Image: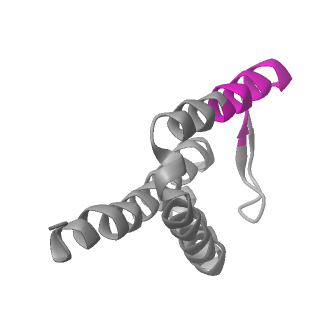
Amino acid sequence: MALIQDPATYSLNFGPTATWVAFIVGVLMYVVGFFGGLRLNLAKMITAVVLASAVSVVARPLVNRVHVFVASILGGEIAGFAIPLLWTVFVLGVCLSLYESFTVTAKEAHPMK
């Protein structure tokens, strides 16, 4: 696992095999989710993903500044691992929270009669 230290382009590089395996597992998760009920709420899922992606893109410069700050305190290797991981968890949390709000809250606010 190699680290790229430039905060504007920092990432973990696991190599092509692990990258392709992770991508294929992600696609399979979407396929399983789609047939497991996601197709019934597809518009809500797409809206949640688009909004979470917009938050991610717009807030990225702040994440780069945090990465530089953390790297100055803890070192580049720790920051290069921790900051992308925490940012991914944050964006996933935003997306899941939005999706839950769209699906569960809407059903609770307007129960079927």
For the point 71% across and 47% down, the residue is 11
**Image quadrant assignment for residue 1:** top right
Vertical arrangement, residue 90 with respect to residue 23, above or below: below
Q: Residue at x 27, y 72 (%)?
A: 106
Q: In front: 110, or 86?
A: 110
* Residue closer to the observer: 29 or 4: 29
Expressed as whole percent of the image width and height from the top left, the position of residue 99 reads 40, 62
Magenta span: 12-27
- Determine whether 58 is above or below 21 in the image: below
User: In this orientation, which residue lies closer to the viewer: 69 or 99?
Assistant: 99
- The answer to which of 98 and 33 lies nearer the viewer is 33
Magenta region includes residue 25: yes
Residue 87's spot in the image, x, y percent? Answer: 51, 58
Q: Is 110 contained in the magenta span?
A: no
Q: Is residue 23 visible?
A: yes
Picture coordinates of residue 48 (x, y %)?
Answer: 50, 67
Quadrant holding the C terminus: bottom left
Does residue 74 appear anywhere in the picture?
no
**Looking at the image, which residue sits at the far front?**
113
